[in-house]
Image: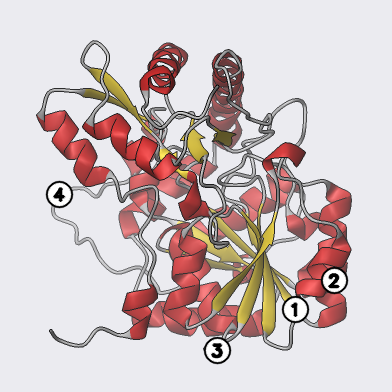
Amino acid sequence: MPFLSRRAQLAPASPIRKLEPLARQAAERGLHIYHLNIGQPDVPTPAAFLRAATLPEGQVLAYSPSVGLYGFRRALAAHYSGSLGLPVTEEDVLVTTGGSEALLFAILSICDPGDEIITPEPFYPNYRMFAVMAGAEVRPLRTRIEEGFRLPPPAVFAEAVTPRTRAVLLCNPSNPTGAVYDPEALRAVVDLCRQRGLYLIADEVYREFIYGGLRPQSILAIPGATDVAIVVDSLSKRFSACGARVGCLVSRLRPVLEAATRFAMSRLSPPTLGQLGGMAVLQEAEAFIEPMIADFERRRNVLLEELRRLPGVLCPEPQGAFYLMARLPVDSSERFCQWLLTDFSLDGETVMLAPGPGFYATAGAGHDEVRIAYVLAEAPLRRAMHLLGHALGTYPGGTRG
């Protein structure tokens, strides 16, 4: 067999997408599947985005500058300055092909092979993939479902730092847990990074998705954070435009942005049409975002209500994003999620979830947990939880009494 690189051999499969072949087969058998495995909201993309993400007939769909369209960068900077009160300028913004490319560029800019990035687990699985692509390693810090997945204390972060550590990576609000981190805990991480000469990569893709009267926060608002912070952001969730593939890096650290820009030049340009759409919706962001967040808070409440009716299920209340991690009374969430697609149905329907182990780097962790994305409206969400309850009652690997 032809040679495969070590990088290719180490690349982990996505727990969010790896069951897709089973889902396709289930659909071909005629099953209706409630997809709660992936962060694809059912909220219609703003009309202004769709109208602007096009060109008149006869024009050329051309490359944009590698750093992004200047008008779009200015619009992003104005959004940060206006909605968050942060002193962000166009020069602090690099437009990327989704938040994923922003993360990859950030890691490539600061890590050499063998370097380490500290991140709380469970974490977004692509963090591990991007680290593998850069030859770096993710060093996980365990958080626990019984404690609401809150950040470990500063001493635990400090103890995890080694001579190979280059950055701390935080997702706030968290994908996959929905945890929103306490400002004091964030300040402690900022202080640690400044004291130990580390970068702080802040994934803020879900920044506005925050509930219970809490207000959106950016790491850039913490005193001293601009000395160490690299913010990753995206339009995907905020404007329900996942397929536009438009994100950005935001940082005051000029050497990092210059390095990331050189990587950006090699891929030529980010999506032009997505940037045109983004410019349009950034001008009316609050009118779209505020009612959407209220809708997702209602969905969260519905999901919690339904899950807490199911015997043996543990799920802390998420304060943000549109995910939660739940512990189920099953022997293996991997086998259970597969079984939902291969063996279970009720009235021609089933539900698709993301198995928990793929969100951990620690072997054996999350074996009975799943991530649930509450990306469906309230009625289908209740139906999906009804199906889950029946499935838990009939799954042969159940562990409930």
Q: Earlier in the sequence, mark 4 or mark 2?
A: 4
Label 3 vs label 4: CA separation? 46 Å
Report the side of 361 relative to 162 (left or right).
Answer: left
Can you identify the residue that label 3 sits on? 112
Q: Earlier in the sequence, mark 3 or mark 4?
A: 4
Q: Earlier in the sequence, mark 3 or mark 2?
A: 3
Residue kind at label 4, given as amino acid type: Glu
Can you identify the residue that label 1 sits on? 198
Label 1 vs label 3: CA separation? 14 Å
Quarter of the figure with residue 384: top left
Q: Earlier in the sequence, mark 1 or mark 4?
A: 4
Report the side of 146 relative to 246 (left or right).
Answer: right
Q: Secondary structure at mark 2?
A: helix
Residues at marks 1 and 2 touching, judged by CB atoms closer than 8 Å: yes
Q: Which mark is residue 192?
A: 2
Label 4 vs label 2: CA separation? 54 Å
Can you identify the residue that label 4 sits on? 57
Tell me what residue is drawn at x 54 percent, y 85 percent: 259
The x and y percentages for residue 205 are: 56, 50
Q: In front: 350, or 368?
A: 368
Instruction: Answer above or below: position of 212 versus 253.
Output: above
